[in-house]
Structure formats: C-alpha cells, structure tokens
C-alpha cells in the first residue's frame, strides 16, 4: 500500500517528500475542497514543491475537486495546464462536465476521482473511467463489503482510502453543505445541538468501527492510503501510524491484534 | 398542481385511504436510506391498494451490489407499467437507466442534484439527460432549482415542508451502514435545536430544515415551475380532511413533527 499525504506549503513538502509515496496539494487558482488556508500560495510554490518531489522520485497531484460553473471550464483548464507546466503529475477531480471538457481539449494526465464524486458501485466507476480517471478515492461512508466490486474492478482503476481515524465526516461529504460553510464553528456537524432536553452531536462512527473499516480495506488490497491536508501539527504522527497499520495488516495480523496495536500507538489521539 | 404523498417502505402498512385523498401520486421509497427504499414487491402491494394513483419509486445511493437489484426492480416495474417515474440518487444507476433501450422516465433525486450541482448545466449532462424517456427533478430549494436552468421543460417535484440538509450512510441512529442495519432507525421525525441554524429535523439518517418559505417562493415566485408538490405521509394525514388535502394547511402548520 502506498501512502499519499496532503501538504499545505513548502515546509511540509520537505518533511514528507522523503517519507510519503505521493504528495498532493491545492492551489488558489483551482477550486478544491479545503479552505484557502490549506492551499499553496501560488504556482511558483507549486513549481518548487514539484521539483523537490521529483528529486525524491515522488509524484505531486493537485486537488481540483469541486464542481465548477460550466462557463468557468476554460479558465479551469488553463489553470490545470499551468499546474502541469509547473511539474504536477495529475489532478484530483470530481466534476464530470469538466472531465469531458478536458478530454475534448486533449488534456491528458493522471486523474484521481475524488471521494466527493460518491462512487459507490462499479457502474459509477465505469462512468468516470470513460471520462479518463485512473484511480478512485472511495467515499468514507462505504463499507468494505460493499466496496468489493470496486476493489477488484477489471477496469484497471486503482483504489485509495482515507486513513479513517484522521478523516471521517459524520455526514456524506460530497452531498453535504456543511463543509463549505464558513466559519467552521457554524457547521452543525461541529457544534452541539439539543433534542428533547438533551445534547445531540452529529458523530462519526465509533473508533472501533472505523478501525475495522480501515483494517478491512487494508486486507482487501486498496492500493493507496490517504492522509488529508488537515492537522499539520499531527500529520507526521498520522503518517507513521498509517504505515505501521498498513504493514500490520499486510503481515496477516488479526483484527484483535490490529486493534490492540493501534490503541497502543494512540491512533485515537489524531 | 398535482400532489404526491411520500411513503417510505416501513410506512406502507399505515397508509390509509383517507390519508391519500386529494393525492394523485405516491412517491414510494426513500432518497437517503437503503433500508427505507423498499422493494418492487413492497411497491406492488401498495399499488394494489391504490391502483388509481401514479407511483414513483424513490431510490437512494446504491452501494455495491444494491445497484443490480435496484436496476432489475426498475426494469420489472417499468415493464409492468406500474410506475410513472423512478427517482434516482445514484449516478451509476442513472447511467444504467439512460444506457438501456427502454426509455425509462427518470427523476434526479435531491442527493444526486446536490452532488452534481452546477455541472448539470454542462453540455455533457445536457446530452446525457436528453436520453431520458421523461425527465424530472426532485427539488426543495431555489438553489437547487437554479442548477436546473438548462432544463426548462423538465418536471419539477417540489418537496415540502422539509428541505434536505445532509445525510450519513453510516447511520448514527442505527449504529451501522444503512445497507446493513435492517431499518433500525425507523422512527418519527425528531426535532433538533441548532444554536446557529435554528430548527433542524432528523429522520433516520438524514437531516432537514423547514423549507416552507423557500418553497413558497418557488410555488408563487417567478420560477413557478413546480408541477407536483410532494409531502410526507404524516402531514398528508394531518392536512387532509373531507375536502381533501389542503397545501395551505401544510404551509401554516405550527409543529412539523
């Protein structure tokens, strides 16, 4: 299993270019699913990071995983071309209209389908494969048993899963407006609501359930493990845990051993 | 104006003739929860009780093998002429239906519309959706209606009084994925108070807001495109009467739960 780490600046790139198998980032010119603070400053910084990644033999992808106005496709494609010129190896995308436009304009590059595209079955995978994607990030709310067809697909599409302890939205990212609400403290999924005199929170699955899901995906042979751009201060620790978890599952450890080891590493603290 | 009553699988047994007076159609199933969507057999049973109503089978996202089962169910129901439409929230299922020889009447559900958003106006989706036998959309806000500007001839099914906010496939109420829970979260609508957003309504694995103000704008404002208004069974019961269903009572209803 290969690790993919989201980075937010050159300093992080220096930290992870050696350890991760692949890096990804956002740039201000291309709408993506994180707020502006998680983006690089400009194409110049992108170029420096791409050069650094190339020295370590690591690809750098750029996130363009929002839905675009059709009239903005031309500008978006110009932005994508600039990224490629700066050394990016490909993009994380979700907009089928944009993908078709890219195909028609002959923009060929590696395309990773974002989890936001909500690819829950092989038929949806085929839909996007016809538009040029070569890898899919599985939605968080998809159980590993339900993902069997995608994981074993014969379309040649690689699969990627999140390191769930770090990234698991309580609601369905990709069909949820909370993520785009700013500031974050105004999101219902981050505040306490009241119901019948009691507190109510929108919660992600219990820790053991998320670990079981991660274990299942590692055992089932997902190709990439993703660590998002969030939590810069914890990311090194997350990457270390993700690699150990991956090695443990690959080594044939039982789920009980996986659970005990993960707890010992303090996975729940990230 | 046409009225449709939304009935989830677990509510079918409790749907009496009186509650459905004044409605010409039934939206059977659920857009958000696999456990609530029901099967073709469930729909047929309900159709036998209400043969004079038009039926729309409402389906959620299709995880894994669920797509094949749902596609087969749609083929069966469409072939037997039992449904006037199929509400679809899964892109793979939509692709499957639009690729077949049969011109299936398709309605894009709220989850799918929210996922595709403004890309629905792209040449790609305009071409794709032109293949539908008849095209309509499940809508509950002016925002979603705005994404559909390129489809002026499509039917609009306006949902009242709850506008979609968000949902989870890992259902907090059931403590399991909706495909695996067996419908554990079946319950009435629950009201939540948000310090930022006011009232939020929880039903199973989905959250909603009171969308009546927005819906009135769609009904009475310039868009004015809603050909059909869809209301949940509980409100159909409460806002009906001898004279039949009265939408003004829904719009004035003080407590929605």
Image (cartoon, coloured by chain):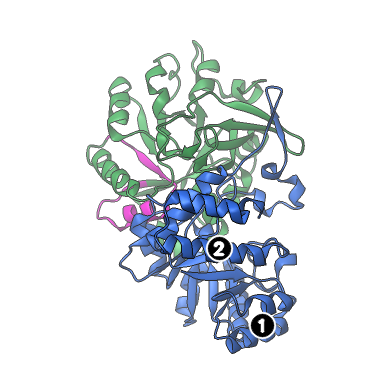
Chain colours: A blue, B green
Left or right of B213: which side holds B113? left
In the figure, A166 relative to A60: above or below? above
Q: Would you identify the image quadrant in which residue A25 lies?
A: bottom right
Q: Which residue is mark 1?
A: A49
Give the foreground label among 2 and 1. 2
Chain letter behind tag 1: A
Q: CA distance from mark 2 to mark 1?
A: 23 Å
Is B8 in front, or is A185? A185
Determine the secondary structure under disc 1. helix
Q: Residue at x 47, y 61 (%)?
A: A248
Q: Would you identify the image quadrant in which residue B166 lies?
A: top right
Q: Which residues are magenta?
A: B82-105
Chain letter behind tag 2: A
Is A108 in front, or is A106? A108
Left or right of A17: which side holds B89? left
Q: Residue at x 43, y 20 (%)?
A: B20
Q: Residue at x 44, y 60 (%)?
A: A249
Answer few, some or many: residues within 10 Å of disc 1's Cα (few below 14, many 20 plus, some between 14 and 19).
many
Q: Position of residue A81 (x, y in %)?
A: 58, 83
Q: Which mark is residue B211?
A: none
Q: Residue at x 43, y 31 (%)?
A: B183
The question of residue A22 being in magenta is answered with: no
């Amino acid at each position: 299993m290969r690790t993919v780490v989201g980075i937010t600046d050159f300093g992080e790139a220096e930290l992870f270019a050696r350890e991760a198998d692949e890096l990804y980032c956002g740039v201000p010119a291309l709408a993506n699913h994180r707020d502006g603070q998680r983006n690089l400053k400009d194409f110049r910084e992108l170029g420096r990071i791409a050069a650094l990644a190339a020295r370590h033999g690591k690809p750098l992808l750029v996130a363009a995983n929002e839905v675009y106005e059709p009239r903005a496709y031309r500008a978006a494609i110009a932005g994508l071309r600039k990224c490629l010129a700066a050394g990016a190896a490909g993009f994380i995308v979700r907009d089928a209209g944009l993908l078709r436009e890219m195909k028609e304009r002959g923009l060929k590059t590696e395309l990773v389908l974002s989890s936001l595209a909500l690819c829950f079955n092989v038929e949806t995978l085929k839909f996007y494969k016809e538009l040029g994607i070569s890898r899919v990030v599985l939605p968080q709310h998809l159980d590993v048993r339900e993902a069997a067809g995608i994981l074993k697909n014969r379309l040649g599409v690689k699969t990627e899963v999140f390191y769930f302890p770090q990234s698991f939205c309580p609601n369905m990212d990709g069909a949820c407006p909370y993520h785009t609400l700013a500031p974050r403290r105004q999101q219902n999924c981050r505040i306490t609501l009241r119901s019948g005199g009691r507190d109510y929170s929108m919660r992600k699955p219990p820790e053991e359930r998320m670990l079981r899901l991660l274990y299942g995906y590692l055992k089932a042979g997902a190709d990439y493990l993703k660590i998002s751009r969030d939590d810069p201060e914890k990311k090194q620790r997350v990457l270390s845990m993700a690699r150990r978890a991956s090695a443990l599952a690959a080594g044939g450890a039982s789920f009980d051993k996986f659970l005990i080891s993960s707890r010992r590493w303090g996975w729940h603290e990230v | 104006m046409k009225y449709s009553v939304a009935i989830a699988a677990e509510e079918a047994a409790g749907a009496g003739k009186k509650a459905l007076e004044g409605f010409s159609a039934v939206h059977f199933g659920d857009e958000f929860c696999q456990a609530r969507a029901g099967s073709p057999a469930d729909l047929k049973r309900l159709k036998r009780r209400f043969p004079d109503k038009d039926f729309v089978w409402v389906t959620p996202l299709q995880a894994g093998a669920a797509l094949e089962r749902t596609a087969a169910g749609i083929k069966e129901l469409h072939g037997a002429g039992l449904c006037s439409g199929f509400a679809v929230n899964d892109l793979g299922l939509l692709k499957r239906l639009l690729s077949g020889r049969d011109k299936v009447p398709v309605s894009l559900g709220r989850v799918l519309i929210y996922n595709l958003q403004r890309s629905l106006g792209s040449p790609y989706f305009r071409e794709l959706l032109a293949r539908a036998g008849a095209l309509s959309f499940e809508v509950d806000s002016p925002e979603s209606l705005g994404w559909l500007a390129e489809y002026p001839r499509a039917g609009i099914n306006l949902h009242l009084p709850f506008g979609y906010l968000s949902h989870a496939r890992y259902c907090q109420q059931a403590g399991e994925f909706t495909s695996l829970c067996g419908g554990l979260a079946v319950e009435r609508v629950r009201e939540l108070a948000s310090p930022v957003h006011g009232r939020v309504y929880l039903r199973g694995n989905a959250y909603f807001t009171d969308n009546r103000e927005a819906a009135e704008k769609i009904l009475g404002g310039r868009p004015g495109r809603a050909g059909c208004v869809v209301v949940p069974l509980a409100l159909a019961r409460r806002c009906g009467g001898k004279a039949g269903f009265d939408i003004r009572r829904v719009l004035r209803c003080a407590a929605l739960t």
